Image (spheres, coloured by chain):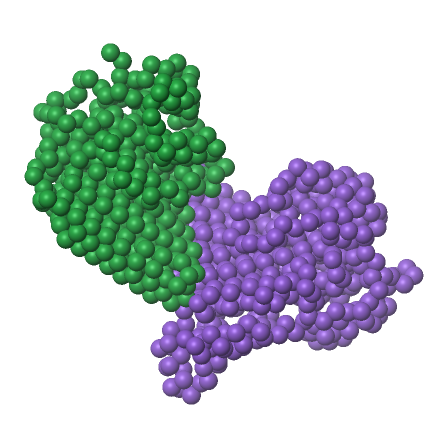
Amino acid sequence: MSNVATTDPATTPVEAFVQLEQNGVELMPLRKAGLARFSETGYPTLRDEDWRFTNVKPLTELPFRPVTSPFDQTPGLEQLGEVTFGCLDADRLVFVDGHFKADLSQIADQSSGVTVSNLAHFEGELGSLSGGDDNPFVALNDAFFTDGAVIQIGDGQHLAKPVHLLFVTMAGEDGEAAHVRNWIVAGANSHGTIIESHLSLGQAATVTNVVTETRVGNGANVEHVKFQDQSAKAFHLASLHSELGRDARYAFHSIALGARLSRNNLRLRLAQPGTECVLNGLYMTRGQQLADHHMIVDHAAPHCDSHEYFNGLLDDQSRGVFHGRILVQPGAQKTNAKQTNKNLLLSDDATANTKPQLEIYADDVKCTHGATVGELDADAVFYLRTRGLDACTARRMLMHGFAGEIVERIRHDAAREELDALVWNRLEAKHQLD
Amino acid sequence: MRADTDTIDEFVASDYKYGFVTDIESESLKPGLGEEAVRFISAKKNEPEWLLEWRMKALRHWEKLECPTWPHVKYPPIDFQAISYYSAPKKKGDGPKSLDEVDPKLLETYEKLGVPLHERARLAGVAVDAVFDSESIGTTFKEDLAKAGVVFCSISEAVQEHPELVRKYLGTVVPYTDNFYATLNSAVFSDGSFVYIPKGTRCPMELSTYFRINAANTGQFERTLIVAEEGSHVSYLEGCTAPMRDENQLHAAVVELVALDNADIKYSTVQNWYPGDEEGRGGIYNFVTKRGICRTNAKISWTQVETGSAITWKYPSVILQGDNSVGEFYSVALTNKAQQADTGTKMVHLGKHTRSTIVSKGISAGRGQNSYRGLVQVGKKAANARNYSQCDSLLIGDRCGAHTFPYIEVKNTTANIEHEATTSKIGEDQIFYCNQRGLETQDAVNMIVNGFCKEVFRELPMEFAVEAQKLLDVSLEGSVG
């Protein structure tokens, strides 16, 4: 049985969609609107300011077929145990090629005010946070999303265990696309930890396009770890839209290690006073990889803090792209915003592109940004050598420190330790090869 | 906050003292852009065939371009057919042969502006080329400079007298295809300055050009070309003013600098075009392309103090092509009333061991919007490139904006790039401290702002630094923060 819509490989997503509609499938307005938007914009090109350094042409040349029916053969549970976070004590929702796998998932009894499930026929307010975005991939997701997670934490409730969302691509053919949609609402004074991981079990050039909408209520405290380690041929496009309520605490960590091309669009809106948000990211690329983080932190209310820390280690011919914009709206006084992007180039062929931007319309604010690109600090290497370390060990130590700086901001102990070990091993493996 | 707002309003209303109009008969081309206008300008200047051809190529290319929309500024679309592309004071007979024959009204204008054209110039020791609308009206100290072998004249004159030099370098740094406004300038440029410093020469005095827009409904399109031969050194200053008018006027200039091996060019600008009124009516649209190229061991340093213009849109850049070359950019940009500025620099590192420094200070007051936009690019072969960028913004009042858009593109591991930016307002504790020491609040603000800009003013030639500081004091009058 074929797991892919039986369309002519030459059909575009739009044509496939029209076929579905003709077959009498009832479509929700969000999907129609998404398709209409995409038909208008098409794929972004290098001429779009937001995509200046990230060429999605190789992706658009793929057939880009949405996987419309679930895959029959799924990895056994024993195999899942071996993947990152597979053994983490957590509620787990597993999605294969964008389809929910109930048999692989496990959800313990959460308290009555908490919902953890797959999206299924949930419509809720999908699109209410991502609506204003002109990113063509969000439009595509609106039109084609198959499934995803719904996490709703009631007022004053909390998640007894972290929720682990595991997205696996199995697809064996190039160009198969999984469109995933997540909806997360944390009520007033609630708290919880969400861990999202994206892995591939095949080697094909698959496409993952995920859109996550998060509403963090007044006084809520949410930590979200996103870990992406897909195959070196995969394309990963992610878009996060979060809105923060009064005195909310929100931490988002993005660890991007895999995929030929990964793009994380992060859109944060600090809608009420007193919020504090941390965006924290690490990208380690090699070969022909490209890792792109593109964020806009919108300070729409006074007395909010935001901190962005992004570190990149770039090897071989890989490329790291960072775009950060802190937007301070008129009246958002007493804003305290800080943005740093540091890049280590490990090879002469690697490229770093960084655009740390500030857009400020209020006067009583403290905003700083900084960006560095370069080799390891010669003084630091020298210092360690004076302490009796050889040059190679000194460099390794500094590299571990550089990556560790990001990983150690993750508050959830088990997740942090697992990622720490993983990043450590990756760096060591790289060192072995040298 | 109440008191603050009042004083800021006062400050916003402070006067532009160069806003007078000189009543002089001038000869203007009727508005409109096309082959005819370009031919008229070229014929007026008695230009050789190759230059006319070059202008025509630019015009044809321009017709295919669209007006750029990416800068962080807002303005209604410009009707390029409503602008007159040439205006010059009417000449009597054959025109003046020396400054003594220049229309006294013109000289009076420059006298009012404080530009030393006559005997005062001798005391000031600065050679001045004065450009009035589309024409250069006179250059001082020509003979003294000629003794040193330095050529300093208007570009129209250079086309006549040194065509080989102009032909060799014109358009080599900013080609006519470069961007919308540079292409427009290439087609219709009227006048500007030309400087040539021969090999191993240190220019004996500061060179200066003073640009004045007088006529209404005209655009000013000047083109400046500075060539510094191997091992030479020159310092060049530029100043600008315009009358107060309700309609916007376009100023689209191009400046090209060529620094050959071991040469050193220092280019300073104090830009004080009419900024428009507090409602944003009138003022100059200042859309300028400035770029320099550095060969081995050469150095180009841009210093700018931007206090005028309704909209400023300029990115003085350096292409660091030769090994060990150095690029510098020091900028103070002040926006108040409804002024908008989108300014910064591009440092393109191509040679080995190239270094660049960027220091940008933005001050926003009233409803001013001030953006820094800069690019630091390190090519694959630019081993050991070094860049340090610092952009600081100071906000005065709560209706203004300060923005930073840096771009960093690095393709070499040995590069060392740092970018830092801060945004702040004048702290109440700073003011309090000064008050406590017996300083008026206004003086304290001036002092703090001048301290904020010190790093840049230090780079200006002395006379200019004093002027710039005064300009800033005047502009900040009443802005108790």
The answer to whether residue B263 is left or right of residue B445 is right
In the rendered picture, chain B carries what hue? Answer: purple
Nearer-the-camera pick, B232 or A212:
A212
- Give the x, y percent position of residue A378: 30, 50
Residue A335: image quadrant is bottom left
x, y percentage for residue B378?
A: 45, 43
Answer with left or right where residue B138 lies relative to residue A48: right
Q: Residue at x 42, y 61 (%)?
A: A330
Residue at 43%, 28% in the rendered image = A57
Residue at 74% x, 74% y is B111
- In the image, farthest residue toward the right: B93
Q: Quadrant of the N terminus of chain A?
A: top left
Q: Which quadrant holds the C terminus of chain A? A: top left
* B378 is higher (above) or lower (below) than B430: above
Tell me if B125 is positioned left or right of B415 in this view.
right
How many callouts does the rendering have? 0
> Which residue appears at 10% of the width and 44% of the height?
A112
Q: Where residue B135 sits: x, y (%)?
A: 77, 58
x%, y% of residue A264? 33, 39
Q: From where the camera sits, is residue B448 visible? A: yes
The residue nearer to you, when weighing B213 against A166, is A166
Residue A29 horizontal side relative to residue A417, left or right: right
In the displayed image of the protein, which residue is found farthest to the top? Answer: A1
| Residue nearest the viewer, comparing A115 with A23 | A23
Q: Is residue B161 visible?
A: no
Vertical placement of residue A378 versus A3, above or below: below
Q: Is residue A417 above or below residue A72?
A: below
Q: Color of chain A here?
A: green
